[in-house]
Structures are given as structure tokens and as C-alpha cells.
Image: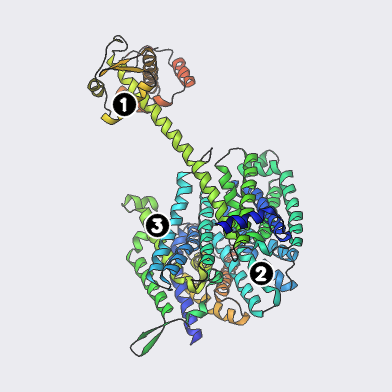
Amino acid sequence: MLDFWTILTAILVATSSAILGSFLIMRKMAMVGDAISHAVLPGIVIAYWLTQSRASFPILIGAAASGLLVTAFIQFFNKKVKLQQDASIGISYTFLFSIGIILISVFSNDVDLDQDCVLHGDIAQVSQGAELIVGQLSLGPNQVWILAANLVLVVLAVVLAYHKLIITTFDESFAAALGLNVVLWQYYLMAGVSITTVVSFQSVGAVLVIAFLVGPPATAYLITTRFRDLLMYAIIFGTSASVFGYYFAVWIDGSIAGAIAAVIGLQFAVVFAIVRFKKRAGEVTTPEKLPIS
Amino acid sequence: MNDFVHGIASFFGLTEPNVRVVFWGSLILCSVSGLVGTFTFLRKRALMGDVISHSVLPGIALAYMISHQKNPMYLIIGAVITGWVSTFLVDYITKNSKIKNDTAIALVLSVFFGIGVMLLVHIQHSGSGSQSGLDNFIFGKASAMTKADVWLFALAGSVIISVILIFFRGFSTISFDEAFAQSIGFPLDFLRFVLAIATVATVAMGVQAVGVVLMSALLITPAAAARFWTNKIGVLALLSVLFAGFSGVFGAAISYTYNGMPTGPWIVVVISLIALFSAFFGSKTGMTRSFLQRKQNDRKILIENTIKLFYGLTDAGNKLTKTFLFEDILNAGNMKVGTLKNGLNLLLKHRYITLSGNQYLITPSGFNEAKAIVRKHRLWELYISKFMNLDPDHVHDDAEGIEHIITPEIEKELEKELNFPKKDPHDSDIPY
């Protein structure tokens, strides 16, 4: 039973991350995703400290606030004082992340959080957490339900705005001509990334979320030119990495989230090598750009 | 607060041998990072610093698993290997597939970091006695440094600094324009390789003080902060070293004073605050300076626009003794009441006009000023109507903007080009 809930948790995180990540890498915003996933930390810690509970609504607000703050910092450095983009990202997220780690030390007596948790979470603990109980029936760990709710939310958000997201991702000038607010849809996507980071935080940690966001879509992008296929393959790669990663971690007795990240890397390496090999053999010609599907 | 002052004072007193080790260790590590970071920053490879700093973790873990001891020499070698491999992979993936550079960076850094975390947890679970020290690499713990560590850092640090100083000109040139550097005979590939190795070695050392997660900040933030104060690369490097060294020592002092405070995050917070301060108040590209410059510009434009009104009112200077009411001046242009009031106050301050009762009178120096701006306006109108074949009706708005930025040199060029004209396209006199 323990295995089941742990693997299910990983699959839920991997699936919502794969969907959002596919948009992120197509928008060349992988590193902004990285920045947000680090920068939600101070918001999470303050909200933990104020409410003294995990997985609550205030934590979402806290994390969203610090997610917005890092975007504001990046904007400030990049636009107001004309610092180059990469340095703006680097300065902003390391600053907020440091404040988060310091806050963990300051509140260490009052808050049930530690530095390890920030790095790789504790996915195995999820199955031992509080359970959702309806009447006499136990429906499994709370955390699993929260992650499932997040997945439904992500799927709904993407399905409802699919065409707008696609157009603003692939053709900004066409989107502008249609009267779509490109910046608004970017924030829409970033909100999804922030929320997913927060709910995944306990299981995979703030730092490793980015492996789930970027890895499977990057592997999928190697083998497809259609965005719908990209989404599907990304989900398949994410899900299978969760299953294999779990057993890999059990086998070497290491961190589960870390092992899943390692498998994600392995998947990419294998697919990359096959594509390279085939290309050299002249069997596959990969188009440079992904057309709108 | 008293504890704080006392703790900091006792840290900087450097009386305890333990404190001396921490002081010199942090100072060396952070200063070297500040120096190397100058080039990371200028080459716009800040995110590559990110990749390297996350990717040294598996190297450290593997070196420990193979050697079974926490000898900093082995750990640094392990870190340099995986750190270098990561930069190689990012470049290889970007070059050989349709994966974009930022995706490759995020992928490599997270996967390497994931492998590192996995191995670290494995080492912890296998329960070997001295593993506790490895945790310090993640968030940095300056107080865990030993005297032997500091000697190693001093040695490696001086090698890195010497290399940077020897190749300073080459590194500066490839930071600004690689193609140009190659064309004037710099060995591009060699310089790039040396710089990459120096960067990776710095990261491998620096993780001891600030930890792998935050090492990237030490490679970017000091140089970015210095950039707000100078345009010269030598000064930039020096300031970057000073800022980094200061935050290194100060962060270590805080971590020494308060038990359980992580060193790395404090160093990063100190250097980030320096960067924020510089962004606001820096003397070269800081926000306050840009703001003041813009204000000054706005004031100059307002003065010129207001004094121009008097030129028309005095009938091109034929009735210089005529005085005007505020309403007269307001009707002469299309300025808002408040703006015009500000403008007139500025003119009074510069003694371009005088005010007696409610009557405004232009002074001779004010009239010269008015003539100058009208001349520039009409010269420009003539210039674009003549050379761009624009209809005279369409040239006014363009001249309204450009008249404020025409320098005396450009004015002379215009006069020469137009052969000292007498009339503008609307057949008005050009005043000299």
C-alpha cells in the first residue's frame, strides 16, 4: 500500500509538471520556471509559521505572493535598471531562496520544516500523513488528494484556454493581432507553475520540481513535431520515470525524488542518443521549428 | 542587538584560531568567486554558473563514495569533473538538437542535482561516520572549515587569480566580442577552455562556504552590483572582488554569532542587498542617477519650450520692451496652466525673464536663449523638408522633439549643409 501511494504521488506531480513544462520550454521560459520554483520558498515558510499547518490555503497565497515577488524583482533588474536577463534571473531567485533558508533556521523551533525538505522533499512521508476520511471510509492520504485536485485544475486550465495558450506561445505577433494579451497569458501559466510547485513541495522539494517540469517535455520534444503529441509523450515519460525512479531509489536506498530526476535524465540521454544515431544514418530529418498543431 | 554587536566584534577581533580560519577561508573563496564572476557576468553566462554550481554535487558525493573520506582535495577533483561535464553537456545538447539553450540548462542542472541528492541520501542511509560533513556542501557551513582547508584554498585561489591576471586582456576581449578577439589573433578556444576550468574550480572551492544551491549567486551578483558603479572592466573586477569579499566575511560573522544560522544564505543576502543598493544609487547606471538625469532633461526641455513662446510674442524681438500677462503667454502656446507656471518659475530663476506686478518681461539673455532654440527648430525643419522631401506641413512635430537635443556641433553642420539659410520652409526668418 505504501508503494502504491508513493508512486501515485510521484505520477500526479509528474503529470501536472509535464503539461505545464511543455508550454514553458516552448516559450523559452525554462529558467523562469526554475527561478519561480526556488523563489516560492520564503512564502511557504512564512505561511507555515503563521498557520502552523501544512497543505493549507494560506500557503498557496504565501507562495503565490513570493512567486509574484520574484517576477517583480526580475522585471525591476531587467527593465528598470537595464541589467541583462540572465543576471536578473540569477540575482532575484538566489536572493529570495536565501531568505527562505534563513527563515527556516529562524523559525526552526516553531516550524516543522528542514533544509533537506527544501531539496528533495519527502515523498515517502506522504503516505504516512493525515488521511482523508469520509464517514467510516479512509480514502488515502490528504496530500494525494491535494495533488489530484491540482492536476484536475491544471488540466482544466489548459483545456479551457488551449487555443489562446497555443497562439500566445507560438506566434506572439499573431496573438497580438487577435487582441490577445500575451503578458496576461504568461502570468496565467506562471500562476500554474507556482501553484504546482507549492503542492509538490512536500513530496519532491523546491529544487527538484524543475526536473519534473523540464525533463519529460524536453525528451518528448526530441521525437515529435506536434504539440499534442508533445504533451502526450511528456506525460508518458514523466509517469514512467516516476515508476522506475521509485524502484531505483528503493534499490540503491537513496532519495526517491532524486532517483526520479536521475531516470528523467537517463530517458533524455537514451532518446537523444537514438535520435542522433538515426539522424546520422539519414533516417530521420527533424524540422527546426514545431508547427502549431 | 547587544549579542549581535558583541558577536560580530569578537569575530572581527580574530583572536580565536577557529575564527581566523573561518575569516580567511570565506574571504579567499568569495573574493576569487567575485573575480571569476566578472567574466561569467560579462559573457552573459550567468545561468551557466547556475549549472556548474548545481552539478558539482554528484561529483562531491561520488568522490566521497570512492575515497571514503572527506579530504577536500578529492572532493574538489570530483566536483571539477562533474562541473565541467555539465557545461560540456549543455553546449553539446544545444548544438546537436533542437532543444533550446535555456531548456538544456534547466535539464542538465536539475538532473545532475537530482543525482547528487540521490547519492547523498544513499551515503546518509549507509551511515558512515563522517558523512555529516557532506551536508555542509549543500547550504555551506563556513564554521566547518579547517586550517588545512584554508591552506588548500589559498593555494588554489592564488593559482586561479594568477591565471586570471595573466590572461586578463584576453578574457576581457572575448567577454565583449568573441569574433573580434579571434580576428585580432587571440586563441579563442584556448581562452574559453582556461576560463571554463577556472570557473569550475572556483565553484568547486566556493561550495564549502555558500553551498551548491547558492554558489551561482556568488558568480553573478557581485559583478552585477559592481556594474552599476563603473564602465571600466578593471574597476569592475576590483569592485566585484571587494563586494564579494565583504559579504563573505560578513555572512560568516553572522553565522558565527548565531548558532545554527547557515552561512551561504547570509552571504547571498548581504551581497544581494549590496546589489539592490547599487541598482538604486549606483553612480553609472543606477536608478537614482538615471532618474535625476531624466528630471534634468525634462527641466531643460520645459525651459526651452517656455522661452520659445516669448520669441513669437515679442514679434521676433522687434518689441523687446513689451510686457505680457500670464493669459497672453498661455494663449500663445498650448501648454497647460500648471506646466506653464512651472516653466515661468524656472525662467525667473535663470533670469531669462523678469516679473513686475503681473507683467512678464523677457531679458536680453532670455532673448538670446529663445533665438537659439528657434534657430535650431527652423534649421531642422528646413533640413528634413529639403533632404527627405517632406511637405512643410509635416516637419513641425519632428522639429519640436529634435530641437532639444541638437548640439552646437550638429547646429554648425546643419548651417553648413544648408548653406546658411535665411528662411525656414514656412518662410519665417531663421534668427542668428
The span from disc 2 to disc 3 (Cα, nearest Å) is 39 Å
Q: Is residue A114 above or below residue B411?
A: below
Disc 1 designates what residue? B394
SS of the residue under disc 2? helix
Up-down: is A281 above or below A83? below
Q: Reading the chain from its start, which is encountered first: label 2 or label 1?
A: 2
How far, Cα to Cα, is label 2 from label 1? 72 Å
Numbered tag placed on residue B134 in the rendering: 2
Residue type (three-letter) at the residue carrying disc 3: Gln
Q: Residue at x 70, y 57 (%)?
A: B25
Write down the quadrant of residue B72 in the picture.
bottom right
Applied colour scheme: rainbow
- Image: B57 above or below A177: below
Identify the chain of the residue marked 2, using the numbered disc in the image: B
Where is mark 3, residue-wise?
A186
Residue A84 percent across, percent down from the top left: 52, 47
